[in-house]
Amino acid sequence: MSTDSNLVQFATAAAWLPGRVAVWPRRRWLLAAGALLASATVRAQERRVLTLGIVPYLTARRLAELYEPLRAFLERELGRPVALETAPSYVAYHARCAAGHYDVIATSPGLGRIAEQEQSYVPLARPLTDLEPLLVVPNDSPLHGVQELRGKVIATSDPLATLTLAARRFLSEAGLPPGSAVTVRAMGTHANSLAALLHGEAVAAIISVTGLKQMGADWADRVRVLARVPPTPPLLYMAHRQLGDETVTRLQRNLMHFGNESPQGRDMMGRLGHNGLRAIAPADLAALDPIAADLRRLLAAL
């Protein structure tokens, strides 16, 4: 029976007991009805499936394979069902974070800084390894220097990805500003980006050291590194304040144990190339401010 139906029956029983008229004064009725509604709301929240949102840098299938141990850990830790989700694009992912759709996120560094500053997400942990963007070319490519990219197409996953923004800055500083000297073309995921590279639709691709590892040897063995882009803080694990301070504090403590000591967590960190977890320092977040500023400009243009 719905909550509204319960409230109607509750009011009817209180007001029309045999031989009595208006047994409950209006104030007491409102208090009791409010308590019943609050109780129903709490029960609904306790039944609600929590959501782990992964930024869409790989295909949904591959993300599910890689992050299933984290989903299972959160389910055990929180004592509630946890669903793993991603989004069709970084823009859609950002919008869902802004709406508080995800309870816990594994997000790109730039979007994570915005989530911390504007979207009520609290830092939990970060990988031990930094994000190291790469410019890669096919093994048989004749290119051997960054300057040879002038006038060419470079593939990437998403225009809002931190590695894309870092590579754009790197290219601009090398005298190859995207949009004039080179074309940076977004392909949706790392798999699409590398496929475009290997099919001749681009002469180079932007990916990270960890992204290449997560793609698997079939992909990694077919490309070589043309240039290394200066590293940035990596993917960030965060929780929404709607979980409550006690839950967030517990996650901050126990997620570190999961990633560094539990067999499932250590195996997951190894497959991701993250090598373990540590706390997110204020300096990590501050280092992302230039990337976050670029992101805000791009989002405003969209």
Image (cartoon, rainbow, N blue to C red):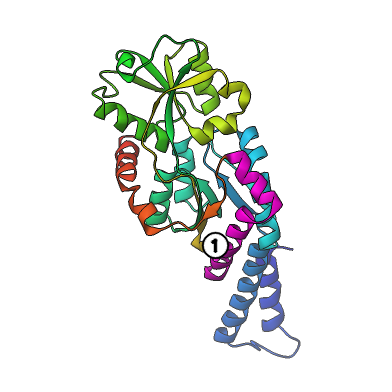
Above-or-below relation of 176 to 16? above
- The image quadrant of residue 248 is bottom right
Q: Position of residue 133 (x, y in %)?
A: 42, 33
Q: Position of residue 22 (x, y in %)?
A: 64, 87
Above-or-below relation of 64 to 148? below
Q: In this view, does 150 lie to the left or right of 204?
A: left
- What is the span of residues highlighted in magenta in the rendered image? 243-272
Residue 264 magenta = yes
Residue in view at x 62 percent, y 22 percent:
218
Q: Mark 1 points at which residue?
A: 252
- The image quadrant of residue 85 is top right
Q: Which residue occupies the foreground of this view, 183 or 10?
A: 183
In the picture, which quadrant includes the C terminus?
top left
Residue 227 in sight here: yes
- Residue flagged by tag 1: what amino acid is it? Gln
Q: Please, what is the dominant secondary structure of the magenta stretch?
A: helix
Q: Where is residue 191 in the image (x, y as percent from the top left)?
A: 55, 25
Q: Which residue occupies the foreground of this view, 20 or 177?
A: 177
- Residue at the front extreme of this rendering: 144
